[in-house]
Amino acid sequence: MEALRHTINAFATPTTIYLSSVALFAIAMWKMEIVVKPLVMIPVVIVTVLGTIFALTDDHFFKLVTLPDNIPITIMLATVGYFTWYALKKGVENDKRLSENRPLIEQEQDRRVMTWPNLVYIEFICLIAITVFLIFWSIGFQAPLEEPANPTVTPNPAKAPWYFLGLQEMLVYFDPWLAGVVFPGLIVVGLMALPYIDPNPKGNGYYSFKDRRLVIGYYLFGFLIQWVLLIVLGTFMRGPGWSFFGPFQEWDPHKVEALTNINLSELLWVKLLNIGLPKNILLREGVGIVVVLGYLVALPPLLAKTIFKKLYQELSFIRFQIMCFLFLAMLSLPIKMILRWTINLKYIVAIPEFFFNI
Amino acid sequence: MNSKLKQIQKQIVESQIWKSIFRHGMPDDTRTRAMVVLSNVFLHLHPVKSREAGIRVGYTWCMGGITFFLFLVEAVTGILLMFYYRPTAEYAYSDIIALREHVPLGIMRELHRWGAHAMVIAVWLHMFRVFMTGSYKPPREFNWGIGVVLLVLTLLLSFTGYLLPWDQLAIWAIAVGSNMARATPFLGHEGPGASLLKIGDMNLVHAGDDARFGLLAGRMISEATLLRFYVLHCIFIPFVASILMAIHFWRVRKDGGISGPM
Ligand code: HEM
């Protein structure tokens, strides 16, 4: 047991967890017809449950997970996991029906029925179930209350409410103006723009997968990996000083992670060219600025000619630009993560004089 | 005996009082069932008839309805909490303690807090369901947009409420969150571009007037912040959210009811 915990702690780093999740995600997107089968899902559930039980035997992990304010995360993970499977299973089922020219699941009940009692009763039962659930939850877990507010004593770690922890985790890789302002703004704008930049008329009003693979992959990647997974990392594995800890590792407030991160400009001017940083900011950060502009401005036309060729034809120019911008903005997080893990890159563009670091 | 009961029932149902409240008989035939939905202001959110596949729990997961119900739970428990809670630095914390210590078996605060978390989860799942059924596609694009605003408002409701217990957990969680505001481009004093906004030597954006200042009603979290968050939490955001929910529900119907295959 102890040995297993040590192995897991040693293996668990942001890099391994993130990359293995992305790999699993990619496999699932690729072989969805197989992944949603009960034959695959039942072992997955069993392993998850057994793994959780094993994890709960650890004091540190147990304390973290049963903190009253962390209970919702468990509920969120269970429900999001279940419903993701459920929706995709139905999607795959409908794909099959479509290919065999059979009616969709949703077309089997084509009638219109009286709202009372058919719908009203469902709502009523849901309402009672939720009420009972909430009452049990409230009796079981007291709402937390700590010491009175004291602005002079900073807790370590100081964490935002759990649903914002994905954003707080992003602070490791981006400055607050990006992680805390621009990216949340883009998530909201991007979600609103979704109906206007998804040109696919298929899959409207029924579960589906194959016909909408691209957009479903996009959404699920954002939701499951960039949002939910980062919440889990931020809540359960970030301790004092936002240092990373394995799931079964006591949070040691004295753990210091060596900060060896380096800016692109330093890498270029100091390490490679050996002439020191130039005084002129534009000259100093020139390469970084060109890289970022190239990424945001030069890449979309390139994508339009290559992998997004079909999309480009279906979307008008402006819609395609917006779609590309949102896509690239989302992709910038994994890119920055990988640059951090591989070459310890801190900022691509570093102009602290104007709080402009990317 | 049975006939006696029947007679009493008949007398009640045919009394002027009863008839003034319920405009229809028992909903046991199609006509009265339609009447129930039409003559009740709450049920009237629904159409009289619904697409059978659309109302299945397997299709909507009932998640929009659950989100709405949790909002109502929050409103009711929140109003009850407001009777006992004073949003001042002096009393806020002790009022929360009092709720815990002086109310035997009291779970009102728990219901309110866990209900809020549940609402956040439910709204994510609702959005996920709408996405997976492609229900944001024409003609429902606009309602999806309304929904996104509702999602933001739900998170903000939860966030503003987090400060009110006025304990360490509360102020530091809000401190972490609101610190972002000072990095807002142009509008935060540590945001990119803010230092460009100046007249002569005078900075237009500084710690005493930037976005964070506006959010916190001061340079740091203080009693003024507590009042600001209290009003946002109890009045302003619920008010806006209610209006948007009304539009949201209205549009669900106007866009042809719950979505289904063409
Ligand atoms: C406070 C939050 C919200 C409440 C109370 C709410 C409530 C509802 C309800 C009761 C329905 C009827 C069908 C169902 O239950 O699924 C509905 C449908 C819908 N909701 Fe929401 N919703 C909320 C947030 C959202 C969000 C965040 C989105 C998406 C971004 C959204 C988009 C939609 C759309 C497009 C429909 C029509 C779906 C269809 O016709 O199948 N809503 N909403």
Image (cartoon, grey):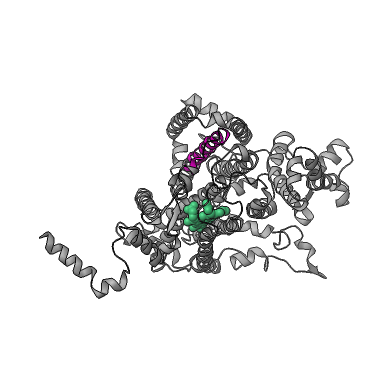
Asked if the magenta segment contains residue B201, the reply would be: no
Q: Is residue A9 above or below residue B56?
A: above
At 65% from the left edge and 59% from the top edge, which residue is drawn? B181
Q: Is residue B12 above or below residue A208?
A: below
Q: Is residue A176 above or below residue B5?
A: above
Q: Is residue A12 left or right of residue A82?
A: right
* Residue A142 pos. (x, y %): 38, 52
Q: Is residue B73 left or right of residue A233?
A: left
Q: Is residue B81 left or right of residue B168?
A: left
Q: What secondary structure do most residues of the magenta stretch adopt?
A: helix
Quadrant of residue A34 within the rendered picture: top right
Quadrant of residue A63 within the rendered picture: top left
* Residue B133 pos. (x, y %): 55, 46
Instruction: Decide if residue B168 is in sight here.
Output: no
**In the foreground, B66 or A104:** A104
Asked if the magenta segment contains residue A105, the reply would be: yes
* Residue B178 pos. (x, y %): 60, 58
In the image, the segment drawn in magenta is A79-106
